[in-house]
Image: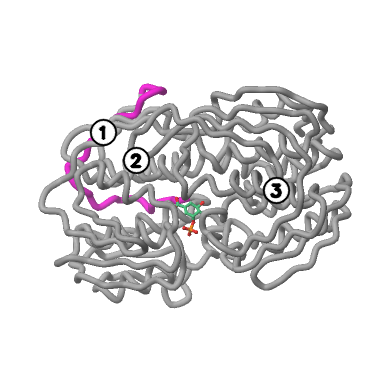
Amino acid sequence: MSFVEVIPSGAFSLSIGDIAPDKSISHRSAMFAMLADGESVISNFLRAEDTLNTLQIVKNLGADVVDNGTIIRISSKGIKEPSEILECGNSGTGMRLFCGLLSSANGHFVLTGDKYLRSRPMKRVTNPLISIGAKLDGRKDGDLAPLSIRGSSLKAFDYKSKIASAQVKSCMILAGLRADGVCRYTEPELSRDHTERMLKGMGADIVVDGLTTTINPLKKLLNPLTIRVPADPSSAFFFAVATAITPDASIVLEGVTLNETRIEAFKVLEMMGADITYKETDNRYEPIGDIAIKYAPLKAITIEDNISWLIDELPALSIAMACAEGESVVKNAKELRVKESDRISTVVTGLKACGIEVDEYEDGYKIKGGNLQKATIDSDGDHRIAMTFIIAGLKCGMKVTDIECINTSFPNFFELLKNITKVELY
Ligand code: S3P
């Protein structure tokens, strides 16, 4: 198991044009290409473990994938029954979206993942799918992978979800595209909406009205996708926090999706005092542009709304909170407990090890701003926890263990970090 020693940094002024491409959009690009009539052309696809697993599954399902290292071309003549078990690795997005895509396909499919994914809840997708006629099963009465799917015909639905989850919503939208009538999906808060935007852009008849998405079943195959995947705001955010906690630092994060369901963490950092500006430079399926951040002293904040817009950034935000003046509170964030790790527990344990006063709640935590101290932090196999405490190390130095997981989402993280400080990898 490898580890990293991070050395505290001084001020920096940088512009980064090669932040890892967006993970959510990369997964979807590969999967949705299977619903198109013709060749989809995808550039800047995220070449990280999670999304490369999805691309491999798309190949296993019979798609023709031509990859010249820069551009990936995908064409499909329909989903074929694979002879392999479909390996989603660490990715909940991969597993949950494939459940929706495959529930109505002809054949038998088995989805599995690494030990972390095999312990994450799947009933949130298997239950609604089974209720519309899907034939799915898994360990613990269908809650845990490996999951098996026998494709079948699906009934139209009007499903009201109790959780604001883009993975569940996307799974049900994919199922709805092949159901036997008009389907409706309602969520309690708007979650990220790449699926709706991309499928509509490909010609699907999907109507979004507030929290309800109406899905009209496909009458024909969709138009192919032509997409350049923008940079991932959740990955970019680690560098935003690095800047916000380093006096006199400034950074420009280029070519990031500015989709409002994805940049809420930057808005929170702004409310905490950081100087942040946004410049839209492009718009394809969603707005894309540059985010510029300048250091300014941070003050505490309470976060209890729009949690799904912040779900991936809350660990990194906890470092900004630890460096802010006053007590910050995160509430209504129980979903953090079922991410790649129990992120309430990993954040609280990590911050305490760094000498920060933290109270843990069932659905969040309270963090008292203070002086971060060097510690040894284990990532618990969670890429965002690893990167969170590496960024904290810019303030005080840090040893972080079990860091291979960073490859699931941000393979060039250390290359970019080396522009800011010295890191020693072991
Ligand atoms: C994702 C949705 C989020 C997020 C995950 C990616 C997606 O999960 O945490 O990293 O691509 O749809 P939930 O929608 O389950 O909260």
Identify residue type, mark 3: Met
- In the rendered image of this protein, does residue 13 appear above or below residue 38? above
Stretch of the chain drawn in magenta: 68-88
- In the rendered image of this protein, does residue 273 appear above or below residue 343? above
Q: Which sits in the foreground, 330 or 68?
A: 330
Sequence-wise first label, 1 or 3? 1
Between circles 2 and 3, the one closer to the viewer is 3
x and y percentages locating residue 261 in the rendered image = 47, 50
Count how many numbered circles sit on residues in the image: 3
For residue 45, side relative to residue 329 (left or right): left
Badge 1 local density, few (<14 within 10 Å), some, or many (20+)?
many
x and y percentages locating residue 112 in the rendered image = 44, 57
Q: Which sits in the foreground, 192 or 134?
A: 192
Badge 3 local density, few (<14 within 10 Å), some, or many (20+)?
many
Q: Which residue is mark 1?
A: 40
Q: Which residue is mark 2?
A: 29
Q: Quadrant of the N terminus?
A: top right
Between circles 1 and 3, the one closer to the viewer is 3
Q: Quadrant of the C terminus?
A: top right
Res 15 label: none
Q: Which sits in the foreground, 367 or 326?
A: 326
